[in-house]
Image: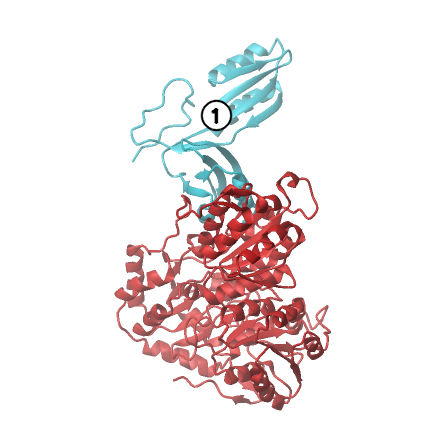
Chain colours: A cyan, B red
Amino acid sequence: MATTKHTLVALVEDKPGVLNRMASLFRRRGFNIESIAVGHSEMPNMSRMTIVVDGAANMVEQLRKQLDKLVVTVKVSDITGDAMVARELALIKVKATSATRSEIMQIVDIFRANIVDVASDSVTVEATGDEDKIDSLLSLLRSFGIREISRTGRIAMTRGISSQPETGKGSSGTRARRRKVA
Amino acid sequence: MKMTGAQIILDGFVKEGVEVIFGILGGAVLPLYDTFPQYPQLHHILVRHEQCAAHAADGYARVTGKVGVCIATSGPGATNLVTGIANAHLDSSPMVAITGQVARPFIGKDAFQETDITGITLPITKHNYLVRDAGSLARVVREAFYLARTGRPGPVLIDVPRDVFMEQVEYHYPSKFDLPSYKPTLQGHPAQIKKAARLINEAQQPIIIAGRGVIISQAYAELKELAERAQIPVITTLLGISCFPESHVLSYGMLGMHGMASANLAVDATDLVIAIGMRFDDRATAKVSAFAPRARIIHIDIDPAEIGKNVRVDVPIVGDVKTVLKELNKQTTTTDHIEWLEQLEEWRRQHPSTDIRDSQGLLPQFVVRKIYEATAGEATIVTGVGQNQMWAAQYYWYDKPNTLISSGGLGTMGFGLPASIGVKVGRPDSTVWCIDGDGSFQMTIQELATIQQERLAIKIAIMNNGYLGMVRQWQELFYERRYVATPLSGPNYVKVADAYGIPGLRVTRKEDVVPAIEQAMAEPGPFLIDFAIEPEENVYPMVPPGASLVELMEEPKKEEAIWPQRSTP
């Protein structure tokens, strides 16, 4: 069966050991996770998790049900087919000399990324967007020499019914086109 | 009111209706045990190994429907529980396990008898807790019992540091608690039930495959109504045995690796499988790609994660079996499937899977059948794991609900004796027979001491073939009779029993079987019979590993059958 990337969003209790329970389940049932990102949600004592998994639809559905079965999870949804906003944050430390620094800054500018740290032989770039955008930025920066990369993995949510089209800063440009809202 | 952590736990037990606790004490749980005298209504049964505390609690839970409770100390006590907890988890048995833990300041320091038992039991419990303050203990106990017995039942472990047992806090038992994330679905979806009813009403060759979910939900009457109204043959899984009377004309016995030939053939030919409270275990389905190839499948289960896990399902119904069947029965029509039932009868005549051949030697099938006759089919049978378990499943006919207690999912050798302790405690008025193998029995033989100390009238039948018999059978059939590490010596079991103060007999001849069983039944207390059975007797039918249900091996014809197939009323 064809595998595709699925985005699962889970609302979970914010308690010690919750991440362990979920990680243990991935391991025990043999699910291969591409990324997992966790943080506080709008509710006190609740965290929201975004899990990206590559697999066949029935396998991912089984993963969703197993996660949902954990006592600490409130709701797990597969939002892959829904209209959604998905973002990732990356920090990239690039080798930079006085000769290359301005070229790097131009690329960073085109990608609406920021330079958050400058040293004599490197700059650190902060970029936000979907995975494709970050991958493209990385491939352009690679020629300068990359020292270190740290990526958060995808965070995602479904679009609001009457949400406005994206504009201005922080948007990921043309790649994350807004899908039709039902 | 101020109470210690230990008092809060025991008070919680009383409020949750606990009467019996199985356990072994140790340093970390000493403060809890020291509190027991304040709660004389709680009966503590001291077992001889923590694994058996869990198995006994499991057996108790299976026959009473109540939550079984076991206690172990930190470190080795807790790790010894692990097999018993995993066993309860796979067979959906409600259990609360309390483990002691080292005092809070020592946690994470590799202190004496410290082990991360919540980490270890993460994948084998329904949920678990490490209690870090006595203030949360009342809520945790309340939640644990609720989680263990509701939805799909299972084991819940509470790990309590030694100093939390002794900590004094203000106490009131919570009347309400909030588990926002835990809401088992009980009602089946009406549209799905309607769809299922239509499939049932249209089916030409339907079968019911019933599992332990029917027993847990106590849906005996509803299952019977469904089967009788539309004249649908009932096949069960191993753990579904005794959810439907086996002498019923519509009962076709167990399916699977050692299932009845007629049941397996029916699964292959059927056009509609109505799977009720079962989970398509590989021992039941055999080769899953060849399972019920012509059939649509209706799957009724309380656990949504079981739907579509192993086999494709056409109509999933998530809900409590009893509730769903009640609704379903309103929508099924009265029909008969005369040709289909005749076909099954024909298969049963052609493949008499429970005939017993004539033999000079002592056949285990003969022993089980004689126990069946002596108990008039009214006993509760507890088994070990292996050949003894299969013979007990095949040659005893279970008419009374929930009378076969066996380790299905985990297949835990050594389950029989400790589980029968819990069974007898939970069902004191029932005759309890533990049908065990000599391999299984030796794994938990020390529980004879518990049986003696508690004066439990458990009748033990050891099917002694001097082998780890089921593995030997595989070696015979698939490893060219290379009997590596299966020949098994044992003690003189009668002398061992005698040493524990339990009377016993060794039976080597066929004609001594019935008198021995009668003597065991006449004895008011426990009794052990060591049956020296044919050493290389095999379990048939057998579906070889990797084969489909119809590729079954039947018993090679040796001598003429003298024990007729049971007559169908």
Query: Which residue appears at 65% of the width and 61% of the height?
Result: B49
Identify the residue position indicated by label 1 in the image: A133
A22 and B33: which is toward the camera = B33
Rendering coords of residue B543 (x, y %): 54, 70
Residue B147 drawn at (x, y percent): 45, 52
Depth check, front residue: B434 or A149? B434
State the image coordinates of residue B225 (x, y, percent, origin top left).
32, 71
Question: Which of the pair B265/A8 is nearer the observer?
Answer: A8
For this view, does B495 lie left or right of residue B201? right
Question: How many numbered discs sit on the rendered protein?
Answer: 1
Q: Amino acid at mark 1?
A: Lys
Left or right of residue B431: residue B341: left
**Image quarter of residue B525:** bottom right
Can residue B386 be seen here? The reply is yes
Using the rendered image of the protein, determine whether residue B550 is visible from the camera's viewpoint.
no
Q: Is residue A177 shown above or below B345?
A: above
Q: Where A163 falls versus A71 (above or below)? A: above
For residue A71, above or below residue B330: above
